[in-house]
Image (tube, grey):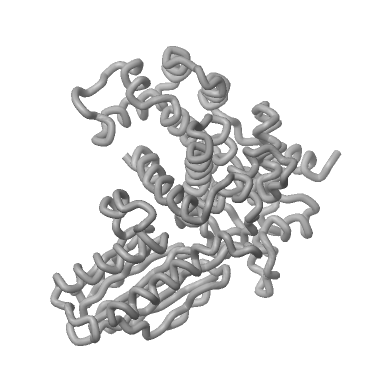
Amino acid sequence: MTAVEELLRSAEKLPPLPETAVKLGEVAQDRYATTEEIEAVIKYDQVVTASVLRVANSSFYATARPVGRLREAVLRLGSTMLFRIAMSRALRAIVSTDIRGYGIAAGEFWRHSVATGIGAQTIQQRISGETDATTFTVGLLHDVGKVVMSQHLAERYDELFTHAGLPSMPFFKIEQEEFGFDHAEVGSALAEHWRLPAEIAVAIREHHSPRAETPPLVDIVHVGDVLSLWMGTGIGTRGIQLSASGDALDRCGLSSEELESCACEAFLELKRVEGIFEA
Amino acid sequence: MARLVVGVAEMAVSANQTDEIITHALGSCVGLAMYDPKLHVGGVLHYMLPTSAIDRGKASNKPCMFADTGVQLLLDELGRLGAAEKARLIAKVAGGAQIMDEEGVFNVGRRNHVALRQICSRTGILIYAEDVGGTKARTMSMEMASGMVWVSSNGNKVQL
């Protein structure tokens, strides 16, 4: 058994991924999912249904008359926004405690996750003119391994990261040296445990080390992670010790200016999604 | 005492000496505190990008997202509270941290800082002190009674 498998096994109870999120992921993976299909998944989840109706009637979307039926709300919001709402709510249920070691509060971790999902989708939209649900899922779950690690290795995590002479290297490398694995590997194993598609598990595992031979999704999420830091999310007490690859940006075909423009757009989207959850 | 919390792409001004203005989680973003010591009027801006030229439309929507439009708005708001004399303003700066990036393509923190220096020199605002760069996360706060600015990072709080 590998160290990661052992960690997952020792975790008394792995956080479950809500059924609505899993099903919606399956439906939305198909770019041509119909609103009927999406509605069919959501309507069994009262909490998500209530959110969707509330958002559809918020000032941003409510152009004319209020909608009362889920079908109309689904049509008004579109599948990208629906998926963001459902998945973001799912992650919120999973992240109930602060991320020890990194000094990131639970709410801030969630914001960083949502921001990375939105950042990655914004980049993908800019590159290809369209975006898909898988990209949001990978962005949202890219750091989910930190949740498990901070819960089950809490004291070692605290000790490691509060050490005064913190070496000047990315956090995931510190984890690798100390534990022999990092949060990306743990997150990837968790995605497999949830039976998410393999491409999601792979992209979570590789998000710190995009290379020419890794799938383009890895580059997109890697740069999306940078964007979310630019947006001021996920900045714990330990600072921003994240390494970033200029090659990944090159492969995305974006200039620095275009990336700043993506950050600007993604930030406004983040505010919108946050507004839904604050309501 | 009221504590005014400034979020990302936001600002706050005050003429109330019992207030404290604070902004958290400055990474690559930059926090700018400006204070008129004669009038005890001041404000704090937390911006995330160097220039509004990348998207004028969004800049008009959310001016505090950018250095240029944000500083202008802060000056306007301070002027509205009577602090219109720029030469008297004490400006202090914190943030502009960098992601570890050998090629320097993701250097928005540094560019945020450079943009502010250019704006300040163009508009005749003096930067008295700054704590910028590195990979640190910073929190910046200003006491309205004295104009004292504090920067805390990783549990250490120092006066700027």
| B124 sits to left or right of A90 | left
User: Which quadrant is the N terminus of chain B positioned in?
Assistant: bottom left
Q: Residue at x 66, y 54 (%)?
A: A154
Note whether residue A29 is visible.
yes
Picture quadrant of residue A95: top right
Pick the front one: A78 or A16: A78
How many numbered marks appear?
0
Does residue A108 appear in this view?
A: no
Q: Nearer the viewer, residue A158 or B26?
A: B26
Residue at (33, 62) in percent of width and height: B6
Spot occupied by residue A49 in the image (x, y as percentages of width and height): 38, 23
- Viewer-closest of A119 and A167: A119
Residue at image position (65%, 55%) is: A245
Q: Nearer the viewer, residue B88 or A59?
A: B88
Q: Quadrant of residue A156?
A: bottom right
Residue sitting at x 47%, y 67%: B111
B129 versus A211 height, above or below = below
List x then y, in percent, for residue A187: 67, 41
Residue A146 vs residue A263: left or right? Answer: right
Q: Position of residue A244 (x, y in %)?
A: 63, 56
Residue A204 versus residue A103 in the image, above or below: above
Outermost residue toward the right in this view: A1
User: On the rendered image, what quadrant is the C terminus of chain B found in?
Assistant: bottom left
Above or below: residue A26 compared with residue B59? above
